[in-house]
Amino acid sequence: MKAKLTVRSVEAMQPDERDVILWDTELAGFGCKLTPAGKRTYFLYYRTKEGQQRRPAIGQHGAIKPEAARAIASAWLAEVAKGADPSLTRKLGRTAPSVADLCERYLSEHADTRKKARSAAGDRSIIRRHLLPALGSKKVAAVARPDIASLHHRLRATPYEANRMLALASKMFALAERWGMRPDNSNPAKNIDRFKEQKRQRYLSSAEIARLWEALDSQAAAAQVQPNAIAAIKLLILTGRRLNEVLGLKWAWVDLDAKLLRLPDTKGGALTVSLNEAACDLLASLRARDGIHPYVIPGSLPGKSLVNLQKPWSKLRKLAELEDVRLHDLRHTFASIGAGMGMSLPLLGRLLGHSQAATTSRYAHLAQNPVREAADTIGAEIIRLSKRRS
């Protein structure tokens, strides 16, 4: 049965025991199928260059008009003339991996196998809170730069979080190219400007250090905070270590005779840390008290370490009147004191376990203090000598 496919001609079709097909008289291969249940669907019949028959559906009558369906059919025929197979392309599109699939593969094949557990957990959090809600159902190949830029912009109130999301998306889509999910050099997270981040640099002054230490040794602290938490904070100050390195420190890694910590796994990899006398004295007192425990800072559960210092720290900094100081600022303070005493940035980097010199460079202005003092001394001496002849 043939006729020009119009709203009138399509709706005039009557259902039968079998499918009824009305072929369009204006475009070869374009037709409308009516099922016994009364469902009318536009389709295109064609043969591929290999001779295979195809009959992909275009859309249901009502949702799409005959003129729009004919335009789609005409575009498909143009693709067929070039050797393409629109039906296969659509099928591959339906089964193509989504961003949710990419996220799952990224976590299992990259983050969980190549990154530290803490970094992988951070990636998982960003994926759960940002990438999946915004892009999870979208096909990997269909994600464009505006999609990523829009998500990045929506997170502008938290620049650090926005930039971490952007960096993670860039890595994931780079892997998508390697895994054949996208064409090469099509990363949609590239060429998007990062937000400016305000780097926090809070160092305790000498007066603040004295106030904090006094608070740590006070009766008020002993009444409010468990001794292990106080010991952990003292170790943070005396060693400049990261919080997880102190809380996870095992006695098996402590060598008091050599005054060393041999940490098997830090943010920068395995690390040997030199200990000062004060840190050694503190560790020796802890060993005498808790020597049979596997961890230097025991927790409340048998055989486990203390896992959180935030509540004890909140109480202690109130006692010391240091409300704006974070635990990580104790590490900055350790480094700032070394820089202020004239220690070189490479040496500070070694002490802190930095893998990149740029990380230590934040203390460069502090390292100029002894240099400035030396310049002042030389200048004063030159002036003194110049006045001897007058």
Image: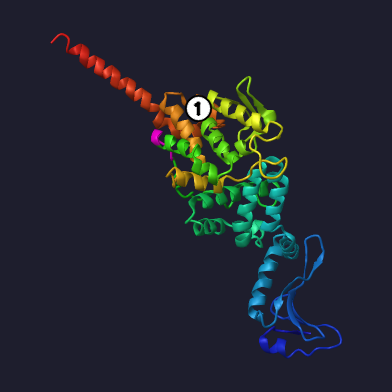
The N terminus - image quarter = bottom right
Q: Position of residue 382 (x, y in %)?
A: 24, 15
Asked if residue 263 lies left or right of residue 43, the reply is left
Magenta includes 204? yes
* Quadrant hosting residue 351: top right
Give, as a three-letter code, the residue at label 1: Leu
The magenta stretch is 202-207
State whether residue 264 is above or below residue 75. above
**Residue farthest to the right, as pictured:** 17
* Quadrant hosting residue 225: top right
Kindly report the secondary structure that dominates the magenta region of the rendered protein: loop
Residue at 86% x, 87% y: name it: 17
Disc 1 designates what residue?
348
**Residue farthest to the top, as pictured:** 389
Q: Position of residue 56 (x, y in %)?
A: 76, 70
Q: Nearer the viewer, residue 382 or 26?
A: 382
Residue at 56% x, 59% y: name it: 147
Q: Position of residue 66 (x, y in %)?
A: 66, 81
